[in-house]
Amino acid sequence: MKKRGNENNVLESEWSYLFDTEALGREPATLKIAPDESQTRTIVKRLGIDGLEGVEARITLRRNNGNMVIHVQGIITAKAFQKCIITLAPLEIDIEAPFEAWYADSSQTLSFTKAKRERDIEKDNIEQPILDEAEDPEPVVDGRIDLGELVVQHLSLNIDPYPRAIGASYALGDDDVTVAHKTGEAYHNPFEALKNWRDKEGKS
């Protein structure tokens, strides 16, 4: 995911909310977090959209039984402002998206599945299937998890890169009309007509 760098080339998130894992005991921890106005503006730039309102995440963190892995579950709500890619009309899109992630301190625990996979790669020198995220948790850095960055990453996954207004569609252009008249068939674009012509030539 894209992050901003400072003059010392240290990667920074547009919105950091650090959670101290030492504070997490046997009981789950629940919290609600939201960026301030300045942080929201930087998130908008990162996502390449027109605006954001009401960004909020409700999060639960718990330690898995039997190991030191921390399971993070939450739900993000927000209103995104974008433009229709066809009409350029402004759009307001309500987002309500669940997410989850797993973290572990690599100095305290090692995924057995990951260790076995790495051993098999070295032994057989063959490609192994990609591990599920739960089997290959993200590292806990300096005893903390950046929940703000986690929320921004999952928010970005729920932003439509090609938003369309209801009922919006591409109009038939002049070139398309010419192709349709010559062939007696209607196509969405000249390339579709060319493909159809090649298919017919191949069959003949």
Image (tube, grey):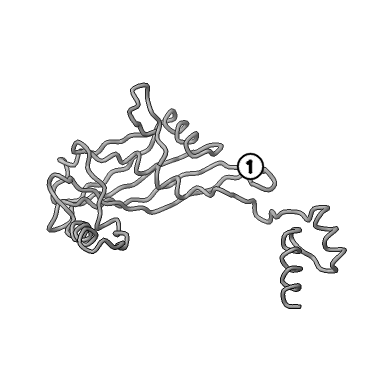
Label 1: how many residues lie within 10 Å, few (<14), some (14-19) or many (20+)?
some
Q: Position of residue 78 (x, y in %)?
A: 46, 44
Q: Position of residue 61 (x, y in %)?
A: 24, 49
Residue 134, relative to residue 183: is it above or below?
above
Based on the displayed image, in which of its 4 quarters is residue 49 positioned?
top right
Asked whether 6 or 194 is in front, the reply is 194
Q: Amino acid at mark 1?
A: Pro
> At 57% from the left edge and 45% from the top edge, which residue is drawn?
92
**Quadrant of the drawing holding the C terminus:** bottom right
> At 17% from the left edge and 59% from the top edge, which residue is drawn?
112
Asked whether 171 or 96 is in front, the reply is 171
Disc 1 on helix, strand or loop? strand
45 relative to 114 in the view: left or right: right
Furthest-right residue in view? 181
Asked whether 85 or 115 is in front, the reply is 115
- Can you identify the residue that label 1 sits on? 90
Furthest-bottom residue in view? 204
Residue 18, relative to residue 110: is it above or below?
above
Q: Position of residue 134 (x, y in %)?
A: 26, 57
> At 44% from the left edge and 30% from the top edge, which residue is drawn?
37
130 relative to 168 in the view: left or right: left
41 relative to 102 in the view: left or right: right
28 relative to 98 in the view: left or right: left
Based on the displayed image, in which of its 4 quarters is residue 194 positioned?
bottom right
Q: Position of residue 6 (x, y in %)?
A: 37, 24
> At 47% from the left edge and 50% from the top edge, which residue is drawn?
158
Residue 193, relative to residue 10: is it above or below?
below
**Quadrant of the drawing holding the N terminus:** top left
Asked whether 5 or 124 is in front, the reply is 124
Furthest-top residue in view? 7
Counting labels gives 1
